[in-house]
Image (spheres, coloured by chain):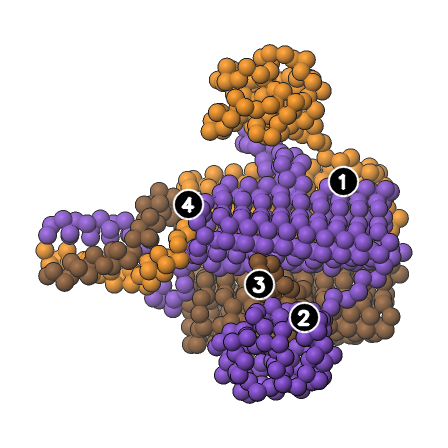
Chain colours: A orange, B brown, C purple
Amino acid sequence: MFLRDLIDKLGGEAVGEVDEPLRGVATIDSAGAGQITFLANPKYRSSLADTRASAVIVNSNDRDVTSRPRILTGNPYAYFARVAQLFSPPPAVQAGIHPSAVVHAGARIAASAGIAEFASIGAGAVIGEGALIGPGCVIGENVSIGAATRLIARVTIYAGCRIGERGIVHAGAVIGADGFGFAPDQGSWLKIPQTGRVLIGDDCEIGANTSIDRGALDDTVIGNDVKIDNQVQIGHNCTVGDHTVIAGCTGVAGSTRIGRNVMIGGAASIVGHIEIADKVIISGNTFVTKSITEPGVYTSGVPHLPHREWLRNTVQFRRLDAMAEAIKKLGDKK
Amino acid sequence: MFLRDLIDKLGGEAVGEVDEPLRGVATIDSAGAGQITFLANPKYRSSLADTRASAVIVNSNDRDVTSRPRILTGNPYAYFARVAQLFSPPPAVQAGIHPSAVVHAGARIAASAGIAEFASIGAGAVIGEGALIGPGCVIGENVSIGAATRLIARVTIYAGCRIGERGIVHAGAVIGADGFGFAPDQGSWLKIPQTGRVLIGDDCEIGANTSIDRGALDDTVIGNDVKIDNQVQIGHNCTVGDHTVIAGCTGVAGSTRIGRNVMIGGAASIVGHIEIADKVIISGNTFVTKSITEPGVYTSGVPHLPHREWLRNTVQFRRLDAMAEAIKKLGDKK
Amino acid sequence: MFLRDLIDKLGGEAVGEVDEPLRGVATIDSAGAGQITFLANPKYRSSLADTRASAVIVNSNDRDVTSRPRILTGNPYAYFARVAQLFSPPPAVQAGIHPSAVVHAGARIAASAGIAEFASIGAGAVIGEGALIGPGCVIGENVSIGAATRLIARVTIYAGCRIGERGIVHAGAVIGADGFGFAPDQGSWLKIPQTGRVLIGDDCEIGANTSIDRGALDDTVIGNDVKIDNQVQIGHNCTVGDHTVIAGCTGVAGSTRIGRNVMIGGAASIVGHIEIADKVIISGNTFVTKSITEPGVYTSGVPHLPHREWLRNTVQFRRLDAMAEAIKKLGDKK
């Protein structure tokens, strides 16, 4: 691949040697001959002088930021993503059903889909063209997996759930387990059957060991182009709007409605039965306790301190009300 | 099924047309013809006027809250749970051992148990009547699974652990992995063999991707009718009393003793080596740092704020002690 | 085994009957005849009078703390760990490849390695001498697993990742899933291919349902003798130094560099792109928001309170800045 090939495929303006041969992408610091890097964050501008990259993707405003062969574009990071995808396409799906796989009666597997060893496909399931059901995946009855969606390995999809096209589900993810619903009855718990489904749109990525519970009566619904990281928990009957991203270790309790283009940092906790408006940004480690109706950034974590300093201050937390009262009294006396 | 059939099976008092045919349950808002709904929370009382449900389960005190065919009962939510269970019983367990399953020498599988494809049953394991070992489950040596307990899929039970009757364990759960125990020795770590077991009582439900570690020397013990949600971590040598519920993403460090009828919200963190009394309620996202000896509700999360407001206030957290001191001095001067 | 056998194998000084027969280890409280216990924490000194243990491991300074047969050593807990390992060695690995396992072309399996049922070994993978690939594990292409490393069950290792020797990886762990990297592009997300690997050193233990993501371009690197508990998430391009321990439910965001001999408590949240110095101790439930350059203990959790007390105080959190201002004004007026 040459620099001019990238321009041909992805657009942008070339400056310098367009016959520069390229074999891959790298960071500014680690790039060597034959690799192309990018400058998106101005704070790395000074590192650019020392890069050994053969070419650089830069913003159109940064035409002269380097003398190396370069590509000018409006969004260098997105351009870089496309270049990286060209150099590292996902492994081709090997069509066909491994002889060890168990495909139950009535399942419909597209001819170009790949069903790997030890996969179990339930009765009535539908697997789309070019989809991959990786080793050890368990696909429940009447599940639908859209075209070109890849379940990497050891993914469980419970009965009746649906995933759209071009998705990726990482190992250990569990889609459609029972929501957490019990009715108290004379000191014991009665299970509420969880009969809703999980419906996931197109172009979603679900991280390793993440769980998304099925709805109790209605469905849990994840929109299109939603990206969910590892170790995330989505409770029953939640809805997540298109283009929303949720970073690792976040938990969302049941029946919460998250809007479109929301960004949720890692290890956030979101209570149930609330609504989060479109375009809200929730910082990592934030405890969201009520609905958020306006776009903006919301935060609650308390940053770390040296332990003794923390100890001295945190004991006052339970005196905050008394402190406020004391301040008020002192003011009144004046 | 007719309304009178529910009365016959589950008790309660019918008001209105007992020959109303019913095909399922639904929420007040989404119910249609042939569906029965319920009113447990007074705040949905006003929605009842618009429901299209064919029948409603209401509190005995609410006899006239609707003119629709209705069932009067002391606990509408529990009654609803029972009705939902009638309409959606768990799928029948298909008795027998799938030809692909590997059953090691000396394992005893009850005749009515179902062992699904790619299940591995260790030597000396005992699987009770009507139990289900779903696809891809790994059952260690000498494990005991009680009658009618269902391991849905891809569950791992380490050697020697026991689960009682009528339980449900969801996909990805890991019961009996080694507790986290290491002795420091000249800058390196020596593993403490974890030779205790996990003992789980009857009627428990364990969520997807949850982990419960085996004890170091003694056992980790989970009582009866304990409900544990997804992504929960229970450390070695913990005990959890009967009827306790633990919501998703909660972590409990080792050797902590949790009482009976305790309710723990999502994403709580509970330190090790403490005791939590019966009937304690711990709010979501709470950090429990010492034993709780009295029933009641306990909380610690700091709610979210708009980021700038958070920033302005949180910087004062490390000045709390100084503030308290300043207030004291101001008071003294008076 | 007799007490003198322990002295022969592990050193230390025997006091009392060296022909005491021993069959196992136990805690001070639960030990019975034939069991050896230990005293490491002075707070259990008083319990020692009542122990029924046949022998005790004590500190050399505690020669007369008990009249029972005893072993004197500089580090009783480490000595106890070694004794426990003698009594409970890990189960021997059964060499050979189970007939149900799928070994892809070009994988190299050492003769003494054990490949269990339903294991999948990718093309070009290398499995070392005495290694165990447990039931249902998925080993990607070109993965390397070092000698004597044991993957207990249902572990997934993505293509190209490496684990050193003598490691343990518990059920449900996922090593090498894609890091969470997307470039925004006109309201949608473009995936950044994650082409780095995960490299894990020797003598590491990785807990159940833990995830360690592969690097985006460079590798995620875990050193030697690193112990990671259950339900932990390590983001792409992190590095973790030798002898560091990370307790359960902790999340580390991408590109963070954690030093050697660091101890991280449970449920900590660590932001991305920071550095944590060697020998730092991070308390459980701490939110680490910026680099820590000095050894020491760092903390941030807010402890639980009775709910009403919490409510009264926490509402003041958003008034902290105003309180500080009020105090300042009151001081100025004096």
| Left or right of A95 in this view: B167 | left
Can you say which quadrant of the picture contains the C terminus of chain B? bottom left
Name the amino acid, label 2: Leu
Label 2 crowd bin: few (<14), some (14–19), many (20+), radius 10 Å: some
What is the spatial separation of the Cα atoms under label 2 and label 4, in whole angstroms?
A: 57 Å
Q: Helix or strand or loop: what does disc 1 sit on?
A: loop
Can you say which quadrant of the picture contains the N terminus of chain B? bottom right
Name the amino acid, label 4: Tyr
Pick the front one: C154 or A43:
A43
Q: Position of residue C161 (x, y in %)?
A: 71, 44
Q: Helix or strand or loop: what does disc 3 sit on?
A: strand
What is the spatial separation of the Cα atoms under label 4 and label 1, in whole angstroms?
A: 38 Å
Residue B47 in view of the camera? no
Chain label for disc 4: A
Q: Which residue is mark 2?
A: C10
Do badges 3 and 1 share one subunit? no
Residue at horizontal 65 percent and vertical 57 percent from the top: C205
Q: Helix or strand or loop: what does disc 2 sit on?
A: helix
Q: Is residue A312 above or below residue C273?
A: below
Looking at the image, is mark 2 or mark 4 nearer the viewer?
A: 2
Residue C123 in view of the camera? yes
Residue at horizontal 44 percent and vertical 46 percent from the top: C293
